[in-house]
Image: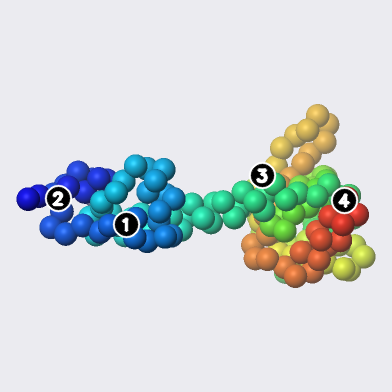
Amino acid sequence: MHTYCDRCNEVADHTVDALGDPQLTDLLKDLGYRTVCPGCYEDLVIEAREAREQQAEDRRSVHRVPAQIPIRIESTDGVPFAETVTEDISENGAQIRANAELEPGTVVHIAALDGTADAVAIVEVVWHDGEALRAGLRLVESSDTWNRLVATHESIES
Ligand SMILES: [Zn+2]
């Protein structure tokens, strides 16, 4: 008797009952798979991990706190670009008023003018909001001082 992989429909010499793996159960339920071949199983493990990371990302991105914080933006080797303010902040980034030509893809050092927080971020997107220029920054790596800044403003919010 041949067993077919629910994902690639190939005859599978041996299949993996992926429902036995709690990490994959939700993903497989969504996809309607019960039995997959070892190759597809490997792919699905990766997809499940990516889906979890995406969910974590989504949670972080909805976790934005409106806050006007004066910041300084410098190149990573300390050349100043601008002093400006944030529009909102989150653990993984900030939306700022961009009054300098910040190029998407540029890695910058951002620091609160009061010295309480700093982080390294990449300029993800720059857009015009009427007359104003806005930029979305994403932290390259998480920063404890930045997280504290977000937490501080979050408690002010609530
Ligand atoms: Zn397969």
Mark pair 1, 2: CA separation: 14 Å
Numbered tag placed on residue 18 in the rendering: 1
Numbered tag placed on residue 3 in the rendering: 2
Q: Secondary structure at mark 1?
A: helix
Q: Looking at the image, do the residues carrying marks 4 and 3 touch, with CB atoms under 8 Å apart?
A: no
The mark lying in front, picked from 2 and 3, is 2
Residue 102 visible in rendering: no
Task: Pick whichever of labels 1 and 2 is earlier in the sequence.
Answer: 2
Who's the residue at 79% across and 39% down the image? 133
Who's the residue at 29% across and 49% down the image? 34
Q: Looking at the image, do the residues carrying marks 3 and 1 touch, with CB atoms under 8 Å apart?
A: no
Residue linked to disc 4 = 158
Which sits in the foreground, 7 or 144? 7
* Residue kind at label 4, given as amino acid type: Ser
Mark pair 4, 2: CA separation: 56 Å
Farthest-out residue, left = 1
Mark pair 2, 3: CA separation: 48 Å
The answer to whether residue 104 is left or right of residue 130 is left
The answer to whether residue 37 is left or right of residue 43 is left
**Percent x, y of residue 84:** 86, 51
Which colouring convention does the figure follow?
rainbow
Numbered tag placed on residue 125 in the rendering: 3
**Percent x, y of residue 33:** 31, 46
Numbered tag placed on residue 132 in the rendering: none
